[in-house]
Structures are given as structure tokens and as C-alpha cells.
Amino acid sequence: MMYQSDQIESYLKNELSLSDKAIFEEMLRRDPLLQNEVHFQEAVIGGVQQYRKDQLKARLNNVSVDSASNISNYKVATIALVGILSVGVGGWYVSDQANKTLKNTPQAINNIRIDHKKLENKNISKIETAPIDNSIKSIKKNPDLIQSSTVIPKHEVRKENLKPFITDTDTIDKEENLEKHDQTKLPTGDIAPVATKNNLGVKVSINHSTQYKFHYSYTDSKLFLYGDFSQLYEILDFNTKEEKQLYLFYQNQFYKINENQSNVGPLIKVNDPQMIKKLNEAKEQAQK
Amino acid sequence: MNNNGNEDEAKDIFQEGLIVFWQKAISGNLVLTSKISTFIYSICQNLWRKELERKSRLSNEEKDSAVIEDSDRLERIKIVNDCINQLGDTCRKILTYYYFENLSMHDIAEKLGFANADTAKTKKYKCKKELDEIVRSQYKASDFMD
């Protein structure tokens, strides 16, 4: 009798091996009494769990005065933080403007409008952080094969709040500006994950250039994207035994990122269906 | 809050999230790779997302039957809840530690001052049997069939 109740418990906890589980389910199908017993046990165990949960919640409720305000404080703190950031970078931008020519002003206005749009997207980005928890798991499970940073969309939506402040110049100043801007690293706050490995620490900057519509350059772990990247995109670090390769995923297409692309070059679409399939799998994996 | 949630739901989710976190932590299954607040925040997001999915699913298909099944289940659980209160203190603790916190027999023995894990195992078996009896005696078998 003890054996059977143990077995029922293991079954309900999903601790049976696949073959044992199959055997048990076959028995279950044939025996209505066993079915009753299993449902009964399910209810009893569920009841115990619910009981304990309620007990703990009751204790939590006794502290609730603080906890409610903690949640809203957390949100207020986050919003304040981002606000301060925007103001801070805005200040940098304004002082920088003094050094630029008039030619850049129309661009600047354009960029500020884009900035508003990005700020609205920020709310959506908060939901996007859900995958981050899972990306921590995926990195642990598949360290060898495929690493993907779904971190980046979140980072990028934030960075995009700031990037538009970079004016587009066709002068050599461009490189310098981007360098400078990278220095104002985003404080990652409470929401950013810490679990990404170093080789995924690719710094991405976007340059809304008029000269380059859909290009990139990549040196020294810094990826510069040129063009209009206002949609969500992802950087995939595709590691297999044969190759290690970065890919950009944007608007449903994959683009190969050459690590030696120090000059600005066009983004080249991946057309090979097999490769596309593999990349999609990698992307799915990382989002689990 | 951006998805038609109200403050009560937020509070519930937060409490659930905290409890999930605590369950993991106390059973020794937790490997923390980030700040605690980050981890809990992620748990809450997942819970809320599931809740939203559940809500949207309900409004699409067979809303009525799903709701009825759910409330049946809840009814059963409440019944069991009441019966648990009739158990002795130790029994109640053993069972909740085992089924909710997922503590090992060894941990339970330690926590409750039993001689060893086997003693705890036997005691737990007896307590469970007792609970089963109480529930069975109070309610007809038909209450537990789907």
C-alpha cells in the first residue's frame, strides 16, 4: 500500500522515468479506482500546498504597508533614473551642438522626434525583459553550441533613447562622437541581467547616417550600425565547432556581421535557407 | 500596470513571486546568477505574463466550462485546507514542509527533531494517511472525481 501511494506521489510530481510513467498511465487508463485515487491525491496535495501558501501570504500581509510602497518606489526610481539619464545626455548633446555646423540642425530635430517614439517603446521594452530570465537558463544549458544575446533588444531600446542625440556628420568627427558616446555607459539598473558572458559583451551603437542607409562596421567588440534601426533587433552569437559568427536579426532577416569589418560596409543578408533555419533555431533556443 | 492590471493583482503577483523565490531558496535548488531583486522581478514578470495569457485564453475559448472546472478544483482544495487544520501541529508541519517547501526527509527530521530521515519518512506517511482519512470521511468520493 505504501508502495502505491509513493508511486502515485512520484507520478504527480513528475518524478517517474518515462518508461515508468508510461506503465503507470496504462494502469491508470485501465483502472477507474486508481484514477479516483490519483485525483484524490492530487486534491489533497494541492490542498496542502495551498494551505502553506495562504499561511505565508498571511504573514506577508502583515508587512504589507511597506511592501506596496516598495513596489511603486521601485518603479519611481527606475523612471527617475532614466529621466536623469536623458537629461544628462541631453546636456552633453547641447554642449556638443555648439561645436557643430548649422547643417546639422535639421537632423537634430529629426532625431529628437525619434527620441519621443523610443520613449514610448520603453514601456514595451519592460515586458521584453521577460526573456532575460530565460536567457540566463539558456546560457547554462548550452554553453558549447549556441549563445544568443536576447539581452540586446532591451539594452538597445534604452540606448536608442540616447543615440538620436548623436548628430550625423560626414566629418571625421563621427568616429570620435561615437567613441565619446560609448563612454556614457548605461547604468544597467536593477533590470539588466548580469549573466551574459564576456564574449557577448558586444557594444552596439546606432548612427542615423544619411550617407550609409543600411551598413555596419565592427571592430574591437564594438558594432556600429548605420541607418535607420528604429525597430527591435537582435545580435546572435552563433558558435559551432566549425565557426563562430555574429549575426544581426532585424525585421525578420538575418545579416552576417564580419568581425574584421573595420571600414563601413553594407549589411549582407543571409539567403541560405539551411542557415536561416539554424539561426532561427538558435534564436528560439535563446528565448526559452 | 501597463496591461490592465490593478494594484491588487500586482500585490498578488508580487506575493506569489516572493513565495516562489522562497520555495526555491529553502529547498536548496537556487543558483543565483544576478541580484535577488532582479531574480524576483523576473519571476513576477513571468507570473504576470502567464496570468495575462490565461486571461486572454479564457475570453477566447469555452470560457464557461473552464471557469467551472477551475472553481471545482478550488472548491476541493478549500475542503482539504479545512481538514488540514484538524491535524496536529507536527503532522501539519511535516506535510507542508514536504509538499510545499520540498524539503528532504533529512531536513525535515532535523527541523522537527526526529531521530533520522527514516523516522521522518514513517511519520510523514502516517500523517498523510490520517489526512486522507479525514478528507475521505468528511466528503463523498464523488467530490473528487472529474
Image (spheres, coloured by chain):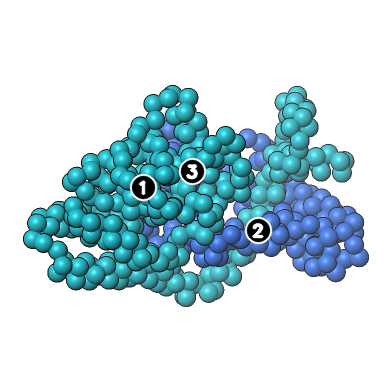
Q: Nearer the viewer, residue A215 or B76?
A: A215
Crowd band around label 2 with a 10 angstrom C-alpha radius: few (<14), some (14–19), many (20+): few
Place of residue A144 in the rendered image (x, y in percent of width and height, measured from the top left): 61, 42
Q: Chain of mark 3?
A: A
Q: Residue at x 53, y 70 (%)?
A: A61
- Element at badge 3? strand
Image quarter where the N terminus of chain B lies is: bottom left
Q: Which residue is mark 2?
A: B30
Mark number, residue A140: none
Q: Position of residue A56 (x, y in %)?
A: 61, 65
Could you tell me how far apart the alpha carbons at marks 3 and 1 are, in whole angstroms? 18 Å
Number of residues whose C-alpha sits closer than 10 Å to that of mark 1, classed few (under 14), some (14–19) or many (20 or more): some
Between discs 3 and 1, the one toward the N terminus: 3
Chain coloured cyan in this rendering: A
User: Viewed as shown, does residue B13 lie left or right of A257?
Assistant: right
Chain of the residue that carries numbered disc 2 in the rendered image: B
- Which amino acid, mark 3? Asp
Expressed as whole percent of the image width and height from the top left, the position of residue A1 reads 87, 41
Circle 1 is placed at which residue position? A262
Q: Please identify, in this view, whether the residue under mark 2 or under mark 3 is nearer the observer.
A: 3
Q: Are marks 2 and 3 on the same chain?
A: no
Which residue is at the front of the view, A211 or A110? A211
Q: Amino acid at mark 2?
A: Leu
The numbered dot on residue A237 is 3
Judge whether A34 appears above or below B124 on screen.
above
Image quarter for residue B5?
bottom left
CA–CA distance in space, label 2 to label 3 = 27 Å
Tell me what hue chain B is rendered in: blue
* Chain identifier of the residue bearing label 1 in the image: A
* C-alpha separation, residue under disc 2 versus residue under disc 1: 43 Å
Q: Quadrant of the C terminus of chain B?
A: top right
